[in-house]
Image: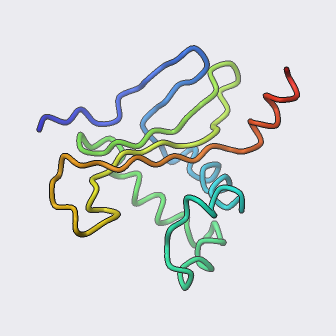
Amino acid sequence: MNYLGSKEIETDRLILKAQTVQEQKRLWEILMMPEVNKYFLTVPSKFREKLLDWNKQEEYYKMDMEHANDSDVFRWSIFLKDTGECIGRVSCQEGHDNDSSITDPSIRGVGWLIDPALKKKDMLQK
């Protein structure tokens, strides 16, 4: 397979960019919201306590970003076009990352997280 990596994607309202270190704390803050992590955070509960402390997580995120522009990495930070605010993340990873019984590398899993406060803002603007 010829992979292109996380190329920038632009819509009318959003810009999806390959992740950088700069927005990782914001993405972590969104992930730590109970209404987000009850669906997205799938680590065993014995590791969750460590995730609650940004100082403990910052090094992990820095290491993770070393490969953010690799051609086989598909993770984007989502930004509002009009404000530049980081509102979430979307990713696509090999299926075996989530299920060891999947051996075909063409099978992918998709995940995303979005700041739930945006829904409230959109409703107020209507």
Image coordinates for residue 111, horizontal then vertical, percent = 46, 49
At a point 68% along the width and 44% down the height, the residue shown is 115
At a point 58% along the width and 76% down the height, the residue shown is 48
Residue 54 lies, with reference to residue 107, above or below; the image says below
Residue 106 lies, with reference to residue 63, above or below; the image says above
User: As rendered, which of 82 and 107 lies closer to the eye?
Assistant: 107
- Most distant residue in the bottom direction: 46
Image coordinates for residue 47, horizontal then vertical, percent = 53, 80
Image coordinates for residue 36, horizontal then vertical, percent = 65, 55
Figure disc tally: 0
Image coordinates for residue 18, horizontal then vertical, percent = 42, 37
User: As rendered, which of 16 and 125 lies closer to the eye?
Assistant: 125
- Most distant residue in the front direction: 101
Residue 54 lies, with reference to residue 88, above or below; the image says below
Residue 29 lies, with reference to residue 81, above or below; the image says below
With 107 as the anchor, is 34 left or right in this view? right
| Colour scheme | rainbow
At a point 51% along the width and 39% down the height, the residue shown is 77
With 96 as the anchor, is 124 left or right in this view? right
With 31 as the anchor, is 105 left or right in this view? left
- Most distant residue in the right direction: 124
Quarter of the image with the C terminus is top right
With 89 as the anchor, is 81 left or right in this view? right
At a point 71% along the width and 57% down the height, the residue shown is 35
Quarter of the image with the N terminus is top left
